[in-house]
Structure formats: C-alpha cells, structure tokens
Image: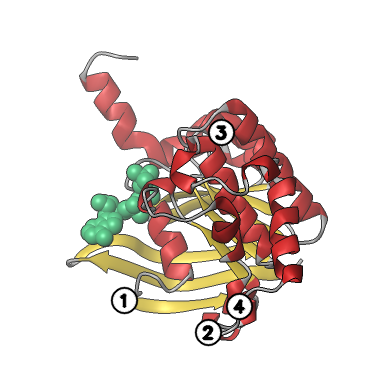
Amino acid sequence: MDSAVQLTNVQVSYQGKEALQDVELIIKSGNLTGIIGPNGAGKSTLLKAILNITPIDKGKIKVLGKPLTECRKRIAYVPQRSQFDWDFPIHVLDAVLMGVYPKLGIFKRPKKKQKEWAYECLEKVGLENFYNRQIGELSGGQQQRVFLARALAQNADLFFLDEPFVGIDMTSEETIIQLLKNLVKQGKTVVVVHHDLSKANDYFDEVVLLNKKVIHTGKPREVLQPDVMLKAYERELSFLREVGVN
Ligand SMILES: Nc1ncnc2c1ncn2[C@@H]1O[C@H](COP(=O)(O)OP(=O)(O)OP(=O)(O)O)[C@@H](O)[C@H]1O
C-alpha cells in the first residue's frame, strides 16, 4: 500500500518548546486513520505541520509522494470548529462553494454547475434544506457537517479533520463517520485527530498513538492495549493516582 503522508525526523516547537520530536510516520493511503493521544500531545500540530500551516524546525514531509506545494489542491482540511468565526455572515451554500474555489481560481464566479455540485455535497451531509441559512444559525453538529460538505466539494484525494466529533450531536457524528468510511471505500485517504478512545476501534482502520513522538501505529486492536496506551497516558494516570482515583 502506498503512503499518503510520510514524515521523517520531524520536529516542531513553539517559542523554543518542542511540541513534536523526531516524528517518523507513514500514513497509508486508502485508509481511515485516527491520530490519538493525550491533551497537548501534538495531534493538531501534526496536522498543521503536514499542511504547512505550522513551520517545522527540521525533518522532511512528503504528501502523496511529493512536497505539499505540488499537491495542495488534492487535499481538504477541516479545522477544529472552535477555530472558525461562526458569526461571520455567510450562507451555508456559499460556505460549501468555498470548497470549489481552489479549482475555480480566485477571479472566476461560480457557475450554475458549481452551485449544483455544492448543493449535492450538502445533500450528502443531509443539510440541503439549510442551504440558504446563515452558518451562525446552525447547531454545532450541523456546522461540522457544513465543513465536511465544503471538503467534499473540493473533491480531494486526502482529507484531514481535526476533532470533528467534539461537541456535536449523535446524528451528526453518525452521518460524518459513515461519509468518511464511504470516502475510504472510494479509494480516498482520511486522517482524523480524535479524542474519544472508546470509539477508536469502531471508527479507524489504523491508529497513530502520539505523545510528542509517535508511540505506536497499527490496527486499533494492537494500539489500544493497556501496555501500549500507558506509554502515552502515564502522566494522566499518575495524576489520577495522586488525586486518589484508581
Ligand atoms: N500556537 C501555539 N503557540 C504556542 N504553543 C502552542 C501553540 N499551539 C500549540 N501549542 C502547544 O503545543 C503543544 C501541542 O499542542 P497541540 O494543540 O498540537 O496538541 P493536541 O494533542 O492537539 O492537544 P488537544 O488534544 O488538547 O487539542 C501544547 O503544549 C500546546 O500548548
């Protein structure tokens, strides 16, 4: 199986403090991969480094076998919902159309065909009836689904989602995970930063356990073993012992 993303000896730091150290990682293409690890483990930083949103101190990153600059249009990124200004006045369909713009070029107006495609993507996430609402009027789960529709509109080969299930309703979560699984069935690659360990086994083909470094990668049942998880969550467990929770 080809690698969708390859990191070699990658280091990232913020104000001199390392968030990622010596990261060696291959994310396989055609898989749904979950990035898990404790708070502050560097999960979001890993995505941002791959997408060149955050600069790396050293190392090498290849995406779809190339430097990112050569394949940016084949990549869709769904950031954390909290990073978006939901008061920004934009209609749902226009937000989805923004996914089409990279392929349109900045000076071209969307045509009927592009609007129809954006509407189709809204149908895929079950929000076609909300197409002319302001995004700020939607629930958290619906907003997340709009983000996903925008990513679908981009027709990318590689999708990155940062904590897509945080603070959303069960219907939205189920809609999103089914859509992501369908993308993988179509041969796409999906990488998800994820918090909830209880779902990791059902959701992912592969899991990357991160805590500044890659602790382990593999099938969920291999990674979600107490002895493996302990290597990343030791600090959290010590805290629980200190406060008397066993
Ligand atoms: N822009 C920034 N400036 C300074 N420090 C940062 C910045 N972004 C992240 N950090 C720090 O880098 C470390 C890794 O953060 P990151 O958000 O990547 O972790 P995470 O695993 O995604 O965490 P969480 O699960 O809590 O969202 C943390 O210690 C965080 O405080």
Q: Are marks 1 and 2 in contact (CB under 8 Å)?
A: no
Tell me the kind of residue under disc 3.
Answer: Gln
Disc nearer the start of the sequence (3/4): 4
| Circle 4 residue | 109
Q: Residues within 10 Å of mark 4 (few under 14, many from 20)?
A: few
Tell me the kind of residue under disc 4.
Answer: Arg
User: Which mark is on residue 57?
Assistant: 1
> On the image, which quarter does residue 220 sit in?
top right
Tell which residue pokes out farthest to the right in this image.
Answer: 186
* Residue at 45% in and 33% down: 167
* Residue at 57% in and 77% down: 72
| Circle 3 residue | 225
Closest to the camera, between mark 4 and mark 2, is 4
Disc nearer the start of the sequence (1/4): 1
Q: Position of residue 172 (x, y in %)?
A: 61, 34
- The answer to which of 96 and 221 lies nearer the viewer is 96
> Considering only vertical position in the picture, is 173 above or below 153?
above
Q: Position of residue 226 (x, y in %)?
A: 51, 30
| Circle 2 residue | 69
> On the image, which quarter does residue 11 sit in?
bottom left
Q: Residues within 10 Å of mark 3 (few under 14, many from 20)?
A: few
Q: Residues within 10 Å of mark 1 (few under 14, many from 20)?
A: some
Closest to the camera, between mark 3 and mark 4, is 4
| Left or right: 8 in relation to 148 | left
Tell which residue pokes out farthest to the left in this image.
Answer: 15
Label 1: state its secondary structure. Answer: loop
- The answer to which of 153 and 67 lies nearer the viewer is 153
Tell me the kind of residue under disc 2.
Answer: Thr
| Left or right: 74 in relation to 147 | right
Q: Position of residue 236 (x, y in %)?
A: 32, 32
Spatial CA distance of label 1 from label 4 is: 39 Å
Q: Are marks 4 and 2 in contact (CB under 8 Å)?
A: no
